[in-house]
Amino acid sequence: MKFIDHIAILVSNLDTAQQWYEENCSAELVFEDYKYKRMKMNNTTIALIDKKYYKHAHFGVLVDCVKEFPAGGKIVPHRDGTVGCYTKDPDGNVVEFIYYSPDMREKLNIDEI
């Protein structure tokens, strides 16, 4: 069984978006760099991604291992230690299959699938 890990939305100002999600959704900042902020909520994570650096919004599907990545996807190691595999569904929507190492799962308090 797979779970939704995050929803990545394009924003024009990371700080303004962070403040809005903190105030309106009780989201908590758990990671940030100059083009991305991860906001933790009770049941998922919202990734705020800067429009200057990213072309597409997407949602992330959590997988147990990289063997579950779909064939033909683009594999990208991320700055935060995760590994993603980006692909498109039949209608052109971007989907990221994302893998967290056991250490990363423990650090972020992600339950086993």
Image: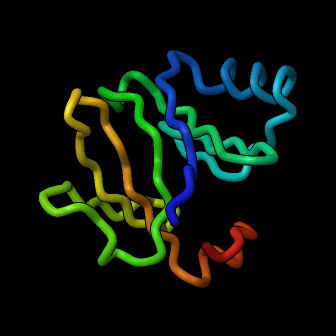
- 34 in relation to 70, above or below: above
Q: Residue at horizontal 46%, vertical 67%?
A: 63
Q: Is residue 68 left or right of residue 49?
A: left
- How many marks on residues? 0
Q: Where is residue 24, by image quadrant?
A: top right
* Residue situated furthest bottom in the rendering: 102
Which residue ends up furthest to the front in the rendered image? 1
Q: Quadrant of residue 33?
A: top right
Quadrant of the drawing holding the C terminus: bottom right
User: Residue 14: x and y, percent?
Assistant: 60, 26
Residue sitting at x 34%, y 31%: 54
Q: Residue at x 55, y 50 (%)?
A: 4
State whether residue 110 is above or below residue 60: below
Along the horizontal axis of the image, is 25 left or right of 9? right
Residue in the picture at 65% in, 51% down: 31
Please say which color scheme the image uses: rainbow
Q: Is residue 71 left or right of residue 12?
A: left
Q: Nearer the viewer, residue 83 or 70?
A: 70
* Residue 11 point in image, percent of width and height: 52, 20
Q: Position of residue 64 (x, y in %)?
A: 47, 75
For the view shown, which residue lies furthest in the left direction? 72
